[in-house]
Amino acid sequence: MSPRVSEVCFVPADDELRASGMQGWCTFVLDDQFKVEGIAVRKTTLGRLALSFPFRQDSFGRRWRYLHPITDQARRSVENQVLALLDLNREFTQ
């Protein structure tokens, strides 16, 4: 069963960050159960939009993710839904 995304909101990055690939940040509701905040929307070197999930880094340099899909299928599902909903409501990918 794929996760279901709804209530997507987007805050665009400033022009300087956009020039580096960062497009902005999104918030969404997952499976009508969890509000997910602080997900970065980035443009890859190939020009594809992708989501980047937040993490903290400890003093040893290890990354600890707050939230992330545990399978590639789940990641693709969430990413496709978020980006599709954003494209319907906002023009930020130019």
Image (cartoon, helix red, strand yellow):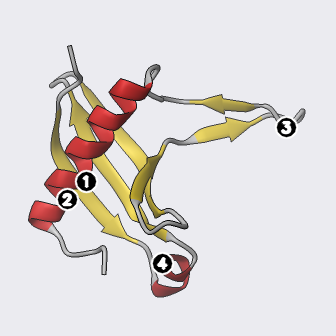
Q: Which residue in the protein does label 1 denote?
A: 83
N-terminal of the two: label 1 or label 4? 4
Kind of residue sitting beneath label 1:
Leu
Which residue is label 2 attached to? 86
As shown in the figure, which amino acid type bears the numbered disc 2? Leu
Q: Secondary structure at mark 3?
A: loop
Q: CA distance from mark 4 to mark 2?
A: 16 Å
Q: Alpha-carbon neighbours of circle 1 within 10 Å: few (<14), some, or many (≥20)?
A: some
- Give residue 15's position: percent from left, percent from top: 47, 86
Q: Position of residue 60 (x, y in %)?
A: 90, 32
* Residue drawn at point x = 25 percent, y = 44 percent: 80
Look at discs 3 and 2 and give the one toward the viewer. Answer: 2
The answer to whether 84 appears left or right of 88 in the picture is right
Label 4 neighbourhood size at 10 Å, few (<14), some (14-19), many (20+)? some
Tell me if label 1 and label 2 are in contact, CB under 8 Å. yes
Real-space CA distance between mark 1 and mark 3, rounded to the nearest whole angstrom: 31 Å
Kindly state the secondary structure of the residue where label 2 is placed.
helix
Provide the residue designation for mark 3.
Answer: 61
Classify mark 4: helix, strand or loop. helix
What residue is rendered at 20% in x and 49% in y? 8
**Residue assigned mark 4:** 18
Q: Quadrant of the N terminus?
A: top left
